Image (spheres, helix red, strand yellow):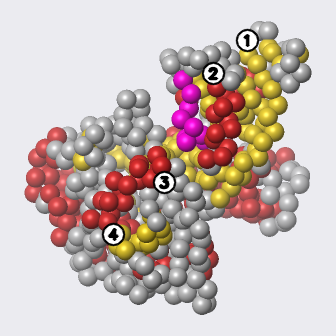
Amino acid sequence: MANTVMSDPMFVYQWWLPVDSQSELSHLAASRVQPEAECMDASYLHCTAHVSHGPDKQYDALFLQDLNDQIACMTLFWSTLKCAVSVSLTPSQQHLFNVDSSFPHISLSKAATDQWRDLGPFVAACEALADWEATPDPLVMCSPSTGFFKQPFAFCTPALRSVYVMDENNIFSDTHTDTFLTNVSSISPALSSVPDTLWAAHKYDVGLIKKCQPVVITPRSDFRPHKHQYPLRQEAIDGITPVFNSLLKAGVIVPCPDSPVRTPIFPVKKITDAGKPTEWRFVQDLKAVNAAVHARAPNVPNPYTIMAQVPPDARWFSVVDLSNAFFSVPVDIDSQFWFAFNFNGKPYTFTRLCQGYTESPTIYNEALRESLESLTLSPGTALLQYVDDCLIAAPTQKQCEQDTLKLLQHLAAEGHKASLSKLQFVSQNVHFLGHNISGEGKTLSPKRIASIVTLPKPQTKKQMMSFLGMCSYCRSFIPNYSQLEQPLFLRGTSNLIDTWKKSQRA
């Protein structure tokens, strides 16, 4: 039996610059480097904060809690072909920066033989140089040992926190045809018993959970937020139109001329390899809506609690990733107006639960739990659920296969969609919620460990609480965690973290 684990796409968390800032930086870079330099697309200037294989749900909660931000450019560095501007991050922003061998920066140009990721080490090397000398231009300095140049560039710009998705494995996805190649036999012949309707046919394919109660939104008051649409470049409009048309055709988006609510959309360009077509994500800024509604009490389970439920005798595992999960939950017709937006001068809204809405994780988690209530698995098999990820853990290979097929068939019957490319089917080693799980136990993935050990020392109450939250996720791997956490928690309740005792640093 094939125990195939498909590689996750790269999720790149970034501060994206608005159009005005993009134009100024692009012109400046072009004036500093040789004509044969390859310049970054002016509509895609950004500062990378974090890169992960697949979505980093813990980081999501920190980075995307406030979309609107501001970053400060500091120094422009360049060689004959490379050019980038360094960025000075605030303490709270620095807490989010997690890129190895790099320095916060905005990439502007490179040699054709370079990768864009090479600009991070380039800026880090420039920042470390100590032999800068004056040039005839009073603003420009040169490093004789490297031939690099620099000049001050004090410039603050608004920035939008966003996530770009870059496909690394195109075995199951064809970006040219915009469809998924669902060859189940390449994973296991047993999957032929699963209805084809379960597998997402393309990246915008959505399900609809049967008998799912439509979501009713409860407002805090009579206030209805109305935010103006950001100016969009024609390139962005053209890029997002296929996404919009697909969701419109599926009934996920419908015309909505009478809504008093408007929130802006901001198309986000995905990172793609050279020669691949440009792709865009449809993102809506629902911050104003979230502030105007009365949210349900969150009941998304704690990942630590979930991981503790993996049976000690489990030796075989499967992981199912549900596609476009929130869109499978309907919104009550009288509440749909809350998600209204304008596109190409016309008003529309969503008929399904939206990404970015404050209640979406809680509502979807409960909807999936109810959808799975009637599923019966073999004694000794555990089904663990965290939002749109499901783990099957069983003592034997045969039982794991039987119960995984039961789960997949049940999901198909209930109206869900799942990603075949992300399916981990009947394996002795799987990746789930930042953990590597096997019959020998659970270990933290290298990515999860790196995300903690590279964090800067917390300097504020908010940073300390965030740090302890990430550490708590790993508490089962830290001996005497409660005793170690207590002095840091008490210190975090003060307004500022001004001094650290030696024992606390340890």
What residue is at 66 percent from the left and 46 percent from the top?
20
The answer to whether the residues at label 4 and label 2 have Cβ atoms under 8 Å apart is no
Q: Which residue is mark 4?
A: 252
- State the separation of the CA atoms marked 3 and 2: 28 Å
At label 3, which amino acid type do we have?
Pro
What range is drawn magenta here? 38-46
Mark 3 element type: loop
- State the separation of the CA atoms marked 1 and 2: 13 Å
- State the separation of the CA atoms marked 4 and 3: 17 Å
Which residue in the rendered view is the most extreme toward the bottom?
Answer: 222
N-terminal of the two: label 4 or label 3? 4
The answer to whether the residues at label 1 and label 2 have Cβ atoms under 8 Å apart is no
Determine if the magenta segment contains residue 69.
Answer: no
Residue 476 in the figure: left or right of residue 66: left
Q: Quadrant of residue 174?
A: top left
At label 4, which amino acid type do we have?
Val
Q: Which residue is mark 1?
A: 146
Give x and y (percent) for residue 435. Answer: 46, 49
Q: Which residue is mark 3?
A: 267
Q: Quadrant of residue 480?
A: bottom right
Does the rendering let one see residue 436?
no
Give x and y (percent) for residue 172. Answer: 25, 42
